[in-house]
Image (tube, coloured by chain):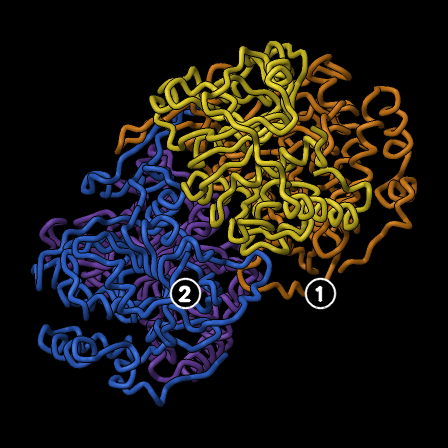
Chain colours: A blue, B purple, C orange, D yellow
């Protein structure tokens, strides 16, 4: 049964050095607040997993939290490179970053396999690419009926999954809608999970067949309004695209990145203060 | 000849023209998304746009800022999970056209979005595969839209992220890949199509005002021109107005900070 | 793109003798009207597939439409046996019925594999049971990473899938809600599909992330109000449980079954007339 | 001793008592569903009922008529597809208790719901597996509720649909099946539990007014009684009232035609 917690307490309890950690969200509902709290608490040696490592993983990698990254597309969406990610891979700064590279289709299937308690995923994938030669985690199975050869890849089973959602009720049942990405699968594939939400409500009043995480598959639910900024929360606020553009300059050099991280994350107490420092107070749309 | 359109505009318009009405199109972000949404406003109102984040049948009024923009969800016929998109819809064989961008490609339209240099000690680490390896094999046909230069059109790839025609000829067919592969590459200079026999990209249409010399200078291999190579139809007034209007409305909706897609 | 059609035309166009045909619906939205039309049109030699063959398959089997049944639970839910199904399996009446038996988990996975264009499904299934000895369609694969042995079964790829849903819009986009069963997977796994609906609407006005079948994955959409009776349609009418109980007596003997089938199906023109003959006119709840 | 409850009532009440509060319970239709919903009204208000048709956390006010009754969907915390139920929820290892019925079982709680007689030329064709083969292996524990007779409690099964303890002892563990297997079989006569060593079902609790003789007469093997076999606690007034009220409200809601579950 999910406990309503402070985010700082949830991260302290659930995320340990060396854990396999997946923060998911496919451009929507990206758990920035949780990522910042992991940085603030100084976690090290994490094996990060994420289909689309973007700004929050760039920040975590640059902050030195990660030893490994399993991913399928790492970029600043619509803008360009992730400079901290590249610096880690190309130059080992601030620490070497091992990578386990997949395709979207593979990772999405691997989360599904993890949620379904299967050790591997089967997909029609990678044919003709260099992946099979370069990436030992990509193997194959043969269909016992047709003899066809298909790609097989290990399932994803994080120690902790962290996602952001729109609402949770008193008991900790979570509702999310809009672009769902692999959030549900990430939570179900993980041993532990934390969900940050925009809003705590008495009752979810969810439509039939909505995407719901029942309280009892979640460890901690944390009320963190705007916790997905600068990404967006459908029904709450839009993407702060200016920040995505600014990030390119902030992150390009190690020094400007470190200064930004210090001021905005390391020296802020929580996400509320981060938003204040960021000066986003005037930008809080109410598109609900 | 001084044209009243930019090279990016004729690229986008030419790419849009390739999308036939009613086609089920799996859309990459950026240039492909712009072209596909332009096509929807022109000759292909019934094209079905699928984005890997989950929307099926998205009909955004302005361009999305990201592959998972809320406007895609709001205007879609259905929004499913990302695993479902890849499993039931792409791998399921339901996609007519995969519309891709590329960091690098070779003469057989193999695509690299992974690394430049050695895989384990890369000179440049690129974003990675995204959906492309499976889009390029599961979609019935593939369109590629990319700005042409010696950096993007290279003699040899350091990593094949997504299969084109591999080593050419029938190499692709022999792997059993279901999709037919790339049918055209649309650039800011020209349109290239795979030769029927060799599957090597050949220039089949040159944009107005572009010389063969310029195309050669921006191609990392000895590019061939097809015998019946013609000039690309310049964008019509309607095409240009529609594209500019789309971009203007996009900028207005997202603010100047929004001109990302 | 789905065509709005008469059910009789849709069945005539899409369902041929010898086809693999799946009528799905997990106690909810069972496509009775479509099953009756298949009987009326005298289809023969069908390879029927259905997780829970119940009254409609009992009727189709008793009417002689089927040569094979792939299934995981065949009974009159909450009542008892399917007498026509048993008579076909035990005595070959009215025709021998080959069976391909699975578990629910297997068939559900096999539809998923079919929808995903995979030749086989992988599951943790059947361990310790007699299935693997008796059923040659149940095989195994070995995980290329852990060495674990898992069950592998052939995917389901029907020639035609038929489901019933609540609504479709002018263009033929279909919305269903409530208990979803494997309907979506059945349609996506099939080469052709027919959907009967309660209602034709201008716009679906579906909630975010609702279960929708886009028009272009469906061949024919047919307006057949009450087309799932005696099963239920969430938001429209409840299950006619009295009929499920009555079916036990009707179906127990060949003669009473034949008489019922003749009067209610073979000699009615369509489902509207069937409902009239059944005398259900007085029972049409409006629970919407 | 003349009891003021029926044998079916003490069976249902005894089965309900086995469901601990907060347990995640995968519920079969019929007797298991009645017992699980009774438990929810008594000591286990926070038990989470999962039905294979898709509802998770169903809280029906009256008993469902079928495994996919609308009342389950209306009262559930979430309603997912049937594949998702089996893949993410059951196989995912999230189910504490699988609550099953049975047509036939043997002394090691292997269950047959497939055929009586030869598989290919059956004497009686039973409904088949349903969800049971995977419920019996993936749920952490299994409860079975079934009316006891020589037809249901048999010496040898013609087909093992769902694994209990197989040939007994550590046979089940040796297969690597994740779930622990059956912890109790609750009948209208008694409660049986697997012996720790041999895993053979032994009578551990006899319902009031039932003789050992009667149990033996209704068991297809030489049934053993455990050394500390006791009498089943008779249903309390509250248990009986709650059960009868539930059944009465169910009949009222569905009409007399509805007394199926």
Q: Chain of mark 1?
A: C
- Return the x and y of residue D160 as percentages of the image width and height: 52, 19
**Of A106 and B150, the residue lying toward us:** A106
Kindly check if marks 2 and 1 are in contact, taking CB atoms under 8 A apart as contact: no
**Of A173 and D4, the residue lying toward us:** D4
In the picture, measured across the screen, residue C275 lies left or right of residue B59, that is right
| Residue C264 higher or lower than D109, as above or below | below
In the picture, measured across the screen, residue A19 lies left or right of residue B248, that is left
Q: Which mark is residue B68?
A: 2
| Residue D185 higher or lower than D237, as above or below | above
Q: Are callouts 2 and 1 both on one chain?
A: no
Can residue B148 be seen from the camera position used here?
no
Name the residue that disc number 1 marks: C202
Q: Chain of mark 2?
A: B
| Residue C60 higher or lower than A218, as above or below | above
Q: From the image, which quarter does the N terminus of chain A lie in?
A: bottom left
- Return the x and y of residue A149 as percentages of the image width and height: 35, 30
- Return the x and y of residue A57 as percentages of the image width and height: 23, 64
Q: Secondary structure at mark 2?
A: loop
In the picture, residue A25 is in which quadrant? bottom left
Label 1 crowd (10 A; few <14 / some 14-19 / many >=20): few
- Return the x and y of residue A153 as percentages of the image width and height: 30, 40
In the picture, residue A7 is in which quadrant? bottom left
Q: Secondary structure at mark 1?
A: loop
Label 2 crowd (10 A; few <14 / some 14-19 / many >=20): many
Q: CA distance from mark 2 to mark 1?
A: 28 Å
At horizontal 63% and vertical 37% (from top left) the residue drawn is D12
Can residue A27 be seen from the camera position used here?
yes
């Amino acid at each position: 049964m999910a406990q309503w917690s402070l985010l700082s307490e949830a991260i302290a309890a659930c995320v340990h050095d060396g854990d396999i950690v997946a923060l998911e969200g496919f451009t929507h509902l990206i758990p920035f607040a949780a990522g910042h709290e992991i940085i603030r608490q100084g976690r090290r040696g994490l094996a990060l997993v994420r289909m689309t490592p973007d700004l929050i993983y760039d920040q975590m990698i640059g902050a030195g939290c990660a030893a490994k990254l399993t991913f399928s597309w790492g970029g600043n969406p619509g803008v360009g490179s992730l400079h901290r990610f590249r610096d880690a891979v190309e130059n080992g700064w601030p620490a070497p970053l091992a990578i386990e590279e997949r395709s979207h289709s593979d990772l999405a299937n691997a989360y599904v396999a993890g949620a379904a308690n299967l050790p591997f995923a089967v997909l029609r994938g990678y044919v003709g690419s260099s992946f099979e030669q370069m990436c030992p985690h990509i193997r194959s199975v043969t269909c016992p009926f047709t003899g066809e050869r298909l790609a097989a890849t290990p399932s994803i089973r994080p120690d902790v999954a962290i996602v952001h959602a729109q609402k949770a009720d008193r008991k900790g049942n979570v509702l999310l809608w809009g672009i769902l990405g692999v959030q549900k699968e990430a939570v179900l594939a993980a041993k532990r999970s934390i969900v940050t939400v925009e809003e705590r409500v008495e009752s979810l009043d969810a439509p039939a067949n909505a995407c719901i995480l029942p309280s009892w598959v979640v460890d901690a639910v944390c009320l963190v309004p705007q916790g997905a900024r600068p990404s967006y929360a459908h029904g709450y606020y839009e993407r702060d695209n200016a920040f995505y553009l600014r990030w390119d300059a902030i992150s390009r050099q190690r020094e400007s990145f470190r200064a930004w991280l210090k001021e905005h994350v390391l020296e802020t107490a929580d996400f509320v203060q981060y938003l204040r420092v960021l000066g986003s107070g005037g930008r809080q749309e109410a598109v609900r | 000849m001084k044209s009243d359109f930019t090279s990016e505009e004729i690229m986008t318009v030419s790419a849009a023209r390739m999308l036939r009405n009613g086609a089920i199109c799996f859309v990459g972000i950026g240039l492909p998304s712009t072209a596909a949404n332009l096509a929807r406003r022109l000759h292909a109102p019934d094209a079905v746009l699928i984005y890997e984040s989950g929307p099926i049948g998205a009909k955004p009024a302005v361009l999305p800022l990201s592959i998972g923009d809320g406007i895609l969800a709001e205007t879609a016929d259905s929004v499913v999970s990302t695993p479902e998109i890849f499993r039931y819809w792409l791998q399921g064989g339901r996609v007519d056209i995969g519309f891709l961008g590329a960091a690098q490609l070779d003469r057989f339209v193999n695509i690299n979005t992974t690394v430049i240099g050695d895989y384990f000690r890369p000179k440049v680490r690129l974003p990675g595969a995204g959906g492309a390896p499976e889009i390029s094999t599961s979609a019935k046909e593939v369109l590629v839209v990319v700005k042409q230069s010696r950096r993007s059109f290279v003699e040899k790839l350091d990593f094949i992220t997504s299969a084109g025609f591999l080593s050419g000829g029938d190499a692709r067919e022999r792997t059993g890949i279901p999709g037919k592969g790339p049918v055209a590459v649309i650039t800011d200079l020209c349109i290239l199509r795979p030769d029927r026999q060799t599957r090597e990209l050949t220039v089949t249409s040159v944009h107005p005002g572009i010389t063969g010399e310029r195309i050669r200078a921006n191609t990392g291999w000895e590019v061939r021109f097809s015998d019946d190579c013609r000039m690309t139809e310049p964008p019509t007034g309607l095409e240009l107005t529609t594209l500019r209007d789309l971009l203007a409305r996009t900028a207005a909706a997202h603010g100047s900070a929004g001109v990302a897609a």
